[in-house]
Each structure stands twice: as C-alpha cells, then as structure tokens.
Image (cartoon, rainbow, N blue to C red):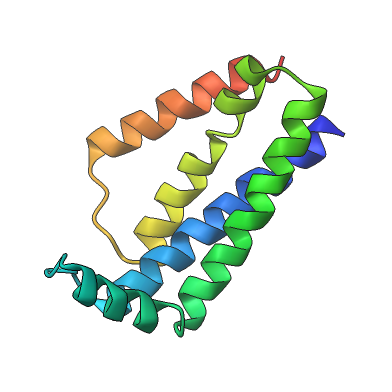
Amino acid sequence: MRWILVAVIVLATTLGEVLQAIGMKRHGEIHDFRPDALGRVVSTLVRCRYILAAIAAMAVSFFAFMALLSITELSFAVPVTAASYIFETVLAKYLLKEHVGWKRWMGVLLVAGGVTLLSF
C-alpha cells in the first residue's frame, strides 16, 4: 500500500508542478505586490484551467501524503517522494523546453540514487 501511495504522490506532485509552471508562464511575471494588484493576480489565476488543475493535483498529492504518513515514518516518506524531482526535471527539459545543464542532471542522478537506497 505504501508504494501505491508513493506513486500517487510522485505522479500528482509532478503533474501539479508542471501544470503550475505552464499556467504561470502563460500569466507572466508578477511585478506588483501591492494588495490590490495581488487581488487581480489571484482573480486572473483562479480562472486559468492550468492553475486549477495544478491545485487539484497538489490536493491529491497532499492527501496521499497524509495517508502515507499514517502508515510509515516521515524519514521514509519525505525522501522517497523526492522522486518527483526526477520526473519534473525530465518534463521541464522535454515538455517545457527548458535548458537543463549538466549540474542539474547530476543533481537528478544524486536524487535518484538516494531514492534507490531508500527502496531497499
């Protein structure tokens, strides 16, 4: 059961963060942080389907993480769900067309090694 929850968390987190990135790239950079300007930003973002889907995916991830914590230790749950960083980096490179340099790929390999160590 815990590995099913880990898979749900990793997939939902990855999906949520990629959708959030797409939504924010479409919105553009936020320059004005006054309360009224932030209200307009929130008003715009709650109508963006990518942001709404990201919120839903992150909610799934959150509740799956709560379920995982109810059956396993935090010292297992947090590091193993870091596998989402691996998938997010791959999707950033190939789906979002971001530049991912060799240092980031080395970081991904280190994360993958840590997750692998935890799985045994």
Q: Is residue 32 left or right of residue 110?
A: left
Q: Quadrant of the C terminus?
A: top right
Q: Quadrant of the N terminus?
A: top right
Occupied quadrant, residue 30: bottom left
Q: Is residue 6 something one can see in this rendering?
A: no
Task: Say above or below: 49 vs 91.
Answer: below
Q: Is residue 97 something one can see in this rendering?
A: yes
Which of the two residues, 70 or 107, is positioned nearer the viewer here? 70
Please provide percent x and percent y for residue 83.
55, 36
Q: Is residue 88 left or right of residue 65?
A: left
User: Which residue is drawn at the image coordinates 71% and 17% (left, top)?
Assistant: 73
Which of the two residues, 61 or 100, is positioned nearer the viewer here? 61
Please provide percent x and percent y for residue 13.
56, 51
User: Which residue is drawn at the image coordinates 53% and 60% (left, top)?
Assistant: 16
Q: Is residue 107 left or right of residue 84?
A: left
Q: Is residue 87 left or right of residue 116?
A: left
